[in-house]
Image (cartoon, rainbow, N blue to C red):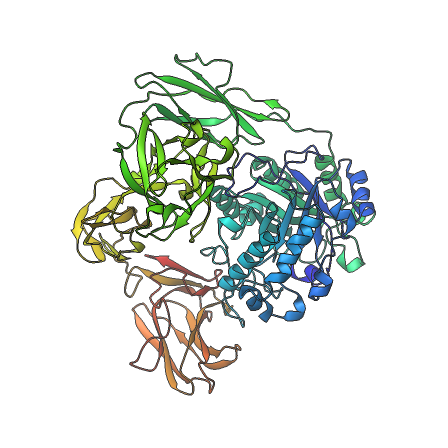
Amino acid sequence: MNTLREMRSGLVAGLFGLLAGTLCLQSAHAAVPLMGFSGRAWNAGVFTGGNGDVPSVSAFTSWRGKPVDSILWFASRTNWTDFDNDVTTDVINFAGIKVLALPTHPESLGWGGLDEVAAGIHNSKWQNFGAYLVANGMNNNRTVLRIGWELNGNWYVWSATSGGPHGDRRQTFKNAYINIVNSIRAGGANAVQFNWCLNKGNQGGTDPTDGWGSYPGDAYVDVIGLDNYDWFSPNFTDADWNNTKSQSPGFNDVAAFCVAHGKQMAIDEWGVIHDSNGGNDNPFFIQKIWDWLNANAGIVAYETTYDETGAPATLHHKLSPPEGTTWNPNSSALYKSLWGSAGTIQIPPAPTGLTATAGNAQVMLAWTTSSGAVSYSIYRGTTAGGESTTAIATGITSVNYTNIGLTNGTTYYYKVKAVNTAGTSGYSNEASAMPVVGASPPIADGTYTLAPANATGMRLQTTGTGDASNVNIGTPSSSTAQQWIFTNVSGNVYRLSPASATAQCLDVNGQLTTSGTNVQTWTYLSQMNQRWALTLVSGGCVLIPQHATTMRLNNTGTANGSNVNQLSANSSTAQTWAIVSIGAPAAPTGLSATAGTAQISLSWTGSSGATSYSIYRGTSAGGESTTAIATGVAGTTYTNTGLTNGTTYYYKVKAVSGGGTSGYSNEVSATPAAAATNTHTGTWAAKGNIPSNPTWIALYQQATCAQNTTYVAKIWVKGSGNFLIKTLDSGWTQIAQTTFAATSTWTEKSITFTTPNTTNPGVLFYIADAGGGGTLYVDDAFMGVNGGTNVLANAGFESGNSVWTVGSSIWSILNNP
């Protein structure tokens, strides 16, 4: 929140928690724990406007009737001196979750400070902060670092806006965030949690969920935060609430992203606001937040209610006495009733949607998350309804499990129970499967390389030949450090020996079974921690589970030297591997797909040494057939014709040479469609719903032009309503503008202008509604010297919203609009 944030320098807020274990988190350390102080199924917190001081938090606790699980502290952000080592003693000594909100850089550095952090200039500051956390006992998963919060707003100097006077800063923010995380870890604080925080809705001319352009990657984020107040879009009806949830960023898409990436979600800040733009005393909003938290407790890390104290102008959120019961009496009473009730954590409901998939001497189980569950227990039998009352596996923290060592030809029956501190649920539905020979890939004993599916062209390698040599990934080479000897032990279980040290074996350090346990090489001892199962998954790739059957070989990054460890089973491609014959070329990279009418055109970057390529296709993500639809493709492009319009097709490509066949490329998809009458060329165009009265909402992008030169800006239009074409300099000062009326046939409209007398000037191509009512279609924009090169990117909108800033209340970019 812009207005409130500008008033705050250091503050404490709420408690947040998350149900550790209901997600398979893609991080090398444990999730933020559920503290249980509040008796809720999540960490319930508050911001009292102080600096984490005991009196303010205690006063709120006494009024609410339940203790808090976590506190929030804001760093001073004037300069580095104010920022250094100023976490208050009350915060350091707090027994629950400590959420530390940290700017990427002091405000005294201005907007350019983000560039400095992105360039690594201030890494030592952040490394020192990591050491400070360690020295003060905060290097643990109860410490959450909320770096550059509300990144999609334009009110902070670290903002990751995609448009406006400072240009597209999303990649800069991403680089800065990554540098901060790496530096803090280098300072020794490698067990803390990192929070990447958005504000609700499209803020300050950018929407980070458009490709999540500022998301730094799963290796750098543990918690994804969302700030949401009953402000500027108050919630009084179910329709209002559904709109709040569905805006972007919002509850729906942030929660879905968290689930897809195995992350926890935090409602970092929420509350009622008593002013002309807020819902004021609005118990409806309180109830809806409560309902959402209960329904989504399985992914909620924590939530922070704002109960701010201060001068009258800042008492927007207050719920507790005396101001809260005066300003927001109904909201205050409902909050106290719900959050302060004597209710305890409830036994979770029984899991649903249990499925069983047969493999070779194994069965793979999957089920739907049970709200409030901390772990799951697996029950098995050999007759319908005959599962033993003694679980075959307990403490399962993922929603899938592979039962290995089974007898092929025997049908096994399974049920699952959910567990938390309150007790154990009833049984799930029953599922059964019969393991069979051939369900896993027939890998002949021999020498291969292993290619991680999430890092195209990389290879599993060991960095040495001695015991305890680290295993990581690196760029393909002819080194024997990237060659692995597969020796079948039984069924689909193999010993994997490094060719560079054949007396050794791929090994889990100390036979550990916890997430993030190092994978290394060790003298072959014929132990279970040196045996690995090959489980066939989509696209001909394999999962490689270790003897601890919920754990899989996991690649934690995509760069040279990225560590390899074992992690609880999840759907991440970091746990999917392609087995590649020795001498085969590297997998192709950069595969892209462009849809046409009944056809899709593919292109990719060639692989060194490849003599041809093979194309694989499916109709679901990861569902490409293992039989190629085309082989012997000589170039790096291919057009697949005769397709069905409206069906989405998925593709991967392999490179082929005399030495063998590579692993798969990245996956792409596209949907062929009949040519649309509302596009000028291609299948995409921008559509404007023009209001009767002009609002001047814009669709625009900035491009670099030659200085002091006559340019033309033009675009093809069709439909009804009035619009304007405008050009502005990089400071948003108008250069030229003309208003036009659309007609029912495609017509090109243009203006001419002279670019600023500035070296490499940035010029905005800007189209906006001008009233008149109607529906307008625009396509094939151009800006440049007449008859010369178009300086606009994605001028025909064929890449969707890419590079365009879209005023979504009027404009949308659509395929076949």
Between 8 and 748, the one lying in front of the other is: 8
Between 638 and 656, the one lying in front of the other is: 656
* Whole-percent x, y for residue 542 in the image: 34, 37
- From this view, report whether residue 139 is shown above or below residue 801: above
* Whole-percent x, y for residue 649 in the image: 28, 47
* Whole-percent x, y for residue 59 in the image: 82, 43
Between 101 and 156, the one lying in front of the other is: 101
- From this view, report whether residue 305 is shown above or below residue 634: above
Q: Residue at x 49, y 31 (%)?
A: 511
- From this view, report whether residue 597 is shown above or below residue 139: below
Q: Is residue 95 left or right of residue 605?
A: right
Quarter occupied by the C terminus: bottom left
- Is residue 282 among the parts visible in the rendering? no
Quarter occupied by the N terminus: bottom right
- Is residue 539 among the parts visible in the rendering? yes
* Whole-percent x, y for residue 380 in the image: 44, 17
Res 177 quadrant in image: bottom right
